[in-house]
Amino acid sequence: MSSTAAPSPISVYGATRRLVEHAVELGGKGIDCALAMIVDTSGACYRGRGAMALLDAEGVREGALTPDLQQAALLTAARDVLANGRAIELPLVAATASRTLEASGRAALASARTFVLRLPADGSPLREALATAAEASAWLRLRLDTGADDAGRTGLGRGEARIGSRMFAFDARGDALAVSMPFTRHVGLALAPPPRLLLTGAAPETATLARLARLLGWYVDLVEHRVESLPEAITRHVDRVHPIVPEALPRLLSERHFDATVACSHDFAIDLQHLRHLAGAGIGYVGLLGSPDLRDAMLSELGDIVATQLEPRLYAPAGLRLGGEGPEATALAIIAQLQHYLAYDALA
């Protein structure tokens, strides 16, 4: 009997940037890895469906699926996969109730159905699919064989990953398949790519904004035509600097996808030009640094038509009201607001 359940969207952290980059790095060094992925849960689990961890024979390289007490079981499973060359299923079960509830007989168990998959160094379609989806800012739809058929569990972990019309098929050992094979039973996941943040203009808040965004696994681009004055504290945390004037922003927006942007030059004329171009773009979060009076002055200057296009997506002043003062506190407030937006509003 074939599973017909449609894959459901997963949080933007289903596939983390650091995990994917580390998997590519280890593969390039000829090191076989194991990818542990939660495919289903019950109860209040530590992590949800789509969460992943990357392991090799020495230990966990990226990601966390379980509290420390169960890391040993995860490492043992990964070593088994690497030694035997076949995927396995690992149930992670943990008590979630307090001792008081346990004493009353009301303790609840949380379980995470976890597949541990092999990522061979000499060619892993799943690793390639994860890296391709992250770089292209594309959703990845993954199907994994549960191995539950009359012939035994020999198909466990075989699967296919799709990015648009492109398909990456792999067998239970993680090696490439020339064609997709039919599934008897499978689980399906839809993994969102790491978010892409565009910062227009360099300001005292920019370095901390970029650093926090990268820490969360986001991609960060910076538009700044005054590149000669950019401090190293900014450039080392930014993936790409676009040394373009505001008039060239529309071309960049047509060539690259961004999930959110923050106008942060603290220059009225420059931010105004950026906002004018961003009004016609399809970015759902447009942040602006500055006071409400500054926001109102800019909207008035932009005119009714442009302001009407922009206002439903404009977060100004950008950031949650966390309290605090200074560039670091402002950056933290903006990242917190972006985290909420990306986890909830962007997927609505």
Image (cartoon, rainbow, N blue to C red):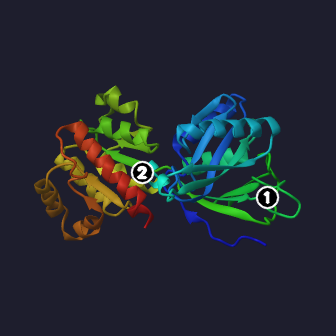
Q: Is residue 225 visible?
A: no
**Circle 2 sits on which residue?**
252
Looking at the image, residue 115 sits to the left or right of residue 177; the answer is left
Position of the C terminus, as image quadrant, is bottom left
Q: How many marks?
A: 2
Looking at the rendered structure, the kind of residue marked 1 is Gly
Q: Which residue is at a point 36% across and 56% down the rendered structure image?
A: 340
Q: Which residue is at a point 41% across and 43% down the rendered structure image?
A: 220
Looking at the image, residue 310 sits to the left or right of residue 167; the answer is left
Looking at the image, residue 77 sits to the left or right of residue 275; the answer is right
Q: Kindly indicate whether the residue at mark 1 contacts the one at mark 2 (C-beta within 8 angstroms).
A: no
Looking at the rendered structure, the kind of residue marked 2 is Leu
Instruction: Kindly identify which numbered label has been placed on residue 315.
Output: none
Q: Earlier in the sequence, mark 2 or mark 1?
A: 1
Q: Which residue is at a point 22% across and 38% down the rendered structure image?
A: 327
Farthest-out residue, right? 151
- Percent position of residue 255, x then y: 47, 53
- Percent position of residue 145, x then y: 75, 59
- Percent position of residue 101, x then y: 45, 55
Q: Is residue 7 visible?
A: yes
Position of the N terminus, as image quadrant, is bottom right
- Where is residue 297, by image quadrant? bottom left
Looking at this view, is 251 or 157 the one in front?
A: 157
- Number of other residues with Cα within 10 Å of mark 1, as a class: few under 14, some 14 to 19, many 20 or more: many
- Percent position of residue 118, x then y: 73, 42
Looking at this view, is 77 or 99 the one in front?
A: 99
Image vertical order of residue 34 relative to residue 303, above or below: above
Label 1 sits on a secondary structure element that is loop
Q: Which residue is at a point 59% across and 46% down the rendered structure image?
A: 52
Front disc: 2 or 1: 1
**Circle 1 sits on which residue?**
147
Label 2 sits on a secondary structure element that is helix
